[in-house]
Every structure is written in structure tokens, then in C-alpha cells.
Image (cartoon, coloured by chain):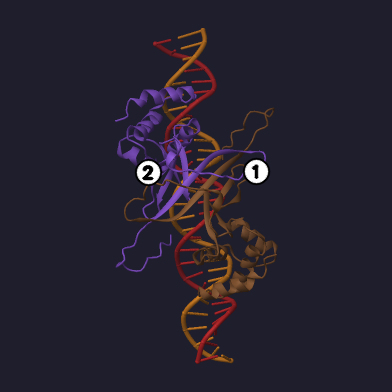
Chain colours: A purple, B brown, C orange, D red
Amino acid sequence: MDDGSTALILQRLKAAGLRPTRQRVALAGLLFRQGDRHVTAEQLHQEALADTVRVSLATVYNTLHQFTDVGLLREVVVEAGRSYFDTNVSDHHHFFLVDSGRLVDIAGERVAVQALPEAPRGTAIERIDVIIRLRNQPRADAAPAKPTRR
Amino acid sequence: MDDGSTALILQRLKAAGLRPTRQRVALAGLLFRQGDRHVTAEQLHQEALADTVRVSLATVYNTLHQFTDVGLLREVVVEAGRSYFDTNVSDHHHFFLVDSGRLVDIAGERVAVQALPEAPRGTAIERIDVIIRLRNQPRADAAPAKPTRR
DNA sequence: ATTCAATTTAGACCCATTCTAAACTGTTGA
DNA sequence: TCAACAGTTTAGAATGGGTCTAAATTGAAT
């Protein structure tokens, strides 16, 4: 859909001093051809393999971090032990579906953070993350909440 | 300072069906004797050993989770691969000092989240986390920002 | 005291992520 | 066109939180 951006991506990679290698171009394709996505390294790796793109998991990690450094991706941490990479780098926040591990964007304007206490001296705000954790609402007649112990 | 709470803690443990064992009582002491704290399992374990409290790391993990389940602690995730446990279980948010890994509480009333889009059907808000990431402000004359690659 | 369930523990194990050192590949300059 | 080298990729080892297991220990209730 948004495939015109491929050229733009190559451009940004070049600007960042990243060679448009087979792997990087392929991963960028998977990441940005569709709309906004939230993927883990493992997911993207599987997707690549399924799409007959041979890439090592190490390269997927490298690429995700490089893209993040360059501003093509944003890393989102909502669960210990797992990182999501978000193709939406505009100012926004997230719903986190605890039960399914799914992330859903919330446009930045919809959330107002105000009356902040001043940041500790010598520090600057890098970013504000608002995460709204959602749990599947148990039906009134359903069985007692199954403890979701990991 | 707030040591009167020890009795209260024992009470809450009992109410939750958790025996006040030597280990649990000792860890509770370390956690709640001081003011609000944000500790990792590893940190608490070290602290216990330093305080001549013999506890295994596994027990520290068990205890932190049990305390969390009972509402004595709240788990905070801001970095992939590390969980913090917060002794402040009231409604509040956090500054996260990226460079030092330190968390600082922000009273709940100081942050207003408004105009939320409705939560996806069949889900209920479990909790809202606002994390303000702070970076040490580089002095104007300082060396160029050292990339803080993990 | 006896007994049994709850608890603790050492150590194995898991799993996401990072590291390493070698193989490979774009790009540049002759 | 090709040599040559820096940038990349990669397999596999290594790391590091965190969890699991099975056996030993302990608290509480008789």
C-alpha cells in the first residue's frame, strides 16, 4: 500500500550511512509495506524466512536496532523480556492487550499529560510513554478469573 | 521510619495465606522499612545477603511475585530484560532516568490522561502507566553525545 | 511430639538478546 | 573492470534475567 516509501527508506538508510544490503532492504519491505506494525525480532525473523528471505536472527536484531537509531522504528517495552518495534514513529501511545500480547496505537493528541513536576535537575525529557494495560473482560457468567501466571 | 507497618505487613501476609517465614519477614523488612523504593530481584538479593539474611535468589523472586499478587508491591517494566518492584502501590507514575536506570515516582494527581479513545470491545483497563524517560542533559560545552548503546 | 502442607533451595534449565570471529559483499578508486 | 577494504552478515557460543524441579526444611495444627 505504502510501497512508495521504499525509495524513501533507501534514501534514509544511505543518509544514515547504512548500505542498502539485500537483508536490510528485504526487512524494510516487510516492516513498512503494510500499515503500522508492532513486531518482535523473532516474529520478523519468522516472517522473513516464510517469505524466502534468508536472514540470520542476529541480523534481524542488528537491523531493528539500526533502524531504531536512525528513527525508522521505535522500541516499545511493555513486558519484561520482550521488545516490540513499532513502525509508527510519530508521537503516540499504546493500548497493551495483556492477554494476547497485542499492541494498539493511540494517537498522541488523544492523550494529554499535564501538570508535570519538573524533571530532576540536569535531565531532559527524551520521550513520554503512556501504556494502557487492558485485560479481557470476563463475562459475568464465566468461570472465576484464571490467574494468568506466566 | 515507617517500621510500624511491619505488624501490618504480617497481617496482610496472613490474610493472603502466606506464612510469615523468616525469609519473607526479612525481605519485607528490607523493602518497607525505608520509604518508597524501586528494586530489582538481584538488588534485593544482594541487600539481603549483605544484611546477613540468608535467602536464595529463587526465594527472592517467589517473594516479590507473591507480594505483588497480594498488592504489597507493583511491578514496573521500563527496560527490556529487567523488572523493578515498586513499594509504592498507590496510583502514580514514573520518571525513568535512562542513563542511571533509576526510577522516580510522580504522584498520580500530577498527571492527567484524558480524552482516551474507547478501549477495544470486551476489554477493561487494568492500569495506566505513564513513563517519562529522562536523559542526562549534555552540557553545551561537553563532548558530542556518547551513544549509549547497551 | 508428630505430621503434613507450605516453603525454601541448589542447580538445572529456558529463552531473548548479545557477542565473536570468520566469511562475505558493496563501494570506491585506479 | 577489478582490486581492496570497510561495512555486513552469520553461525554458534555466550550472557543474563528469570523460571522450574525435586529434595530438604519448616511452620502450624493436632
Q: Residues within 10 Å of mark 2 (few under 14, many from 20)?
A: few
Three-letter code, disc 1? Pro
**Front-lying residue, A3 or A135:** A135
**Residue A13 visible to the viewer:** yes
Mark 2 vs 1, N-terminal side: 2
**Front-lying residue, A108 or B23:** A108
Q: Position of residue A68 (x, y in %)?
A: 48, 35
Q: Position of residue B14 (x, y in %)?
A: 54, 76
Classify mark 1: helix, strand or loop. Answer: loop
CB contact under 8 Å: marks 2 and 1: no
**Front-lying residue, A108 or A115:** A115
The answer to whether marks 2 and 1 sit on the same chain is yes
Three-letter code, disc 2? Gln
Q: A15 above or below B122? A: above
**Residue A80 visible to the viewer:** no
Q: Which residue is mark 2?
A: A43
Q: Quarter-wise, where is residue A20 in the image?
A: top left
Q: Position of residue C11 (x, y in %)?
A: 54, 63
Please state, as top left, top right, bottom left or bottom right, where the C terminus of chain A lies in the image: bottom left
Q: Quarter-wise, where is residue D17 in the image?
A: bottom right
Please state, as top left, top right, bottom left or bottom right, where the N terminus of chain A lies in the image: top left
Task: Kindly identify which chain the residue marked by label 1 belongs to.
Answer: A
Residue at image coords 63%, 64%: B32
Q: B142 above or below A45? A: above
Label 2, label 1: how far apart the Cα atoms are: 38 Å
Classify mark 2: helix, strand or loop. Answer: helix
Disc marking residue A120: 1
